[in-house]
Amino acid sequence: MVSYLPIADVKESWANKSVLITGSGGFVGSQLCRNLVKAGAKVVGLDRQNMRRPDLFGFVEGDITDSGVISIILDIYSPAIVFHLAAAGASDPFLPEERAIMVNTLGVDNLLKAIQGNATVVVARSPAEFNPNSPYAVSKAAGWGFCSMYARTKGWPVLGAMTHQCYGPGQSSKNVLPAALGAFRTGVDFPLSPGEQVRDWVFVDDVASGLISVAQSDLEPATTVDIGTGIGTKLREVVETLVKLTGCNGRPIFGALPLLGSQKT
């Protein structure tokens, strides 16, 4: 497990450092941008959505599958660190196979070939890669395969950050906790699976701090670090705690949905 470093402890090493974040407008990407800006870094965002922010040093609207866009970013900003968070299917793992492969496999390969080992790259990984049963999981695992190959054969400084069950403000309503919270707040009962699945739940700000820790570590290329608490908790327990803390009128209906189906965590 990685040890999280408070932002106050990393200001000196990140001051004026050029950093590129792919998927900068996403759930984790947005928090990482905020943390690095506070640390004094010159943060450049790359996102398919027009998510321009006044606090960023630079922003490019584009796709990691576009070699031309990546080359322009590298020529203009020369990032020393790249956080690769852009992905397709994190909240919709059964997306079309072609799209998953294009972004999660060919996209990361495209990014690494453009960088050519001239920047440290921290790649966000998913525990779904260990039991790939969806296009998202398979394509992410294949993408890391290329990362590991380049790191081992070429010595490129590529590191993996295995992010566990991230949660917090700004998360997509397609995820189970914000979806359940939205229902409870309006007094609507919320159908769930039996809730027996165990996850390592980690707050989004801790994930951002963990990513920063990985980037400034002395780990060998191709190393993957887990970002989590090391404690597994059942979904049922988390949802029941949510109900108690909010005091909402809506109720969780456990067992109304199958474990594998429309409900994604």
Image: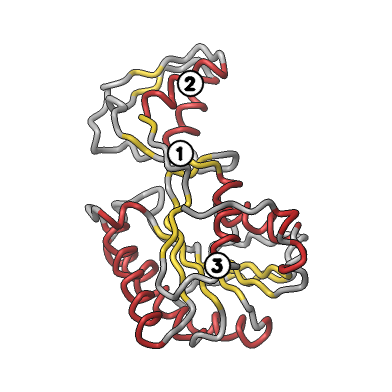
Tell me which label, 2 or 3, sits earlier in the chain.
3
Crowding near the residue tagged with mark 2, few <14, some 14–19, many ≥20 C-alpha atoms within 10 Å: few
> Distance between the Cα atoms at labels 2 and 1?
13 Å
Location of residue 106 in the rendering, given as x and y in whole percent from the top left corner: 36, 75
Residue visible at 40% across and 73% down? Answer: 222
Residue 185 higher or lower than 10, as above or below: above
Q: Which mark is residue 85?
A: none
> Distance between the Cα atoms at labels 2 and 3?
33 Å
Q: Which residue is mark 2?
A: 241
Q: Which mark is residue 83?
A: 3
Work out whether residue 83 or residue 256 is closer to the camera in this orientation and state it.
83
Location of residue 257 in the rendering, given as x and y in whole percent from the top left corner: 26, 27
Q: Which residue is mark 1?
A: 201
Please tell me whether mark 3 sits on a helix, a strand or a loop. strand
Crowding near the residue tagged with mark 3, few <14, some 14–19, many ≥20 C-alpha atoms within 10 Å: many
Residue visible at 44% across and 59% down? Answer: 225
Q: Amino acid at mark 1?
A: Trp
Comparing marks 3 and 1, which lies closer to the viewer?
A: 1
Location of residue 184 in the rendering, given as x and y in whole percent from the top left corner: 50, 20
Tell me which label, 2 or 1, sits earlier in the chain.
1
Picture quadrant where residue 259 is located: top left
Tell whether label 3 touches label 2 (CB within 8 Å): no
* Quadrant containing the C terminus in the rendered view: top left
Please tell me whether mark 1 sits on a helix, a strand or a loop. strand
Location of residue 24 in the rendering, given as x and y in whole percent from the top left corner: 59, 61
Picture quadrant where residue 36 is located: bottom right
Q: Amino acid at mark 3?
A: Phe
Q: Amino acid at mark 2?
A: Thr
> Distance between the Cα atoms at labels 3 and 1?
21 Å
Please tell me whether mark 2 sits on a helix, a strand or a loop. helix
Tell whether label 1 touches label 3 (CB within 8 Å): no
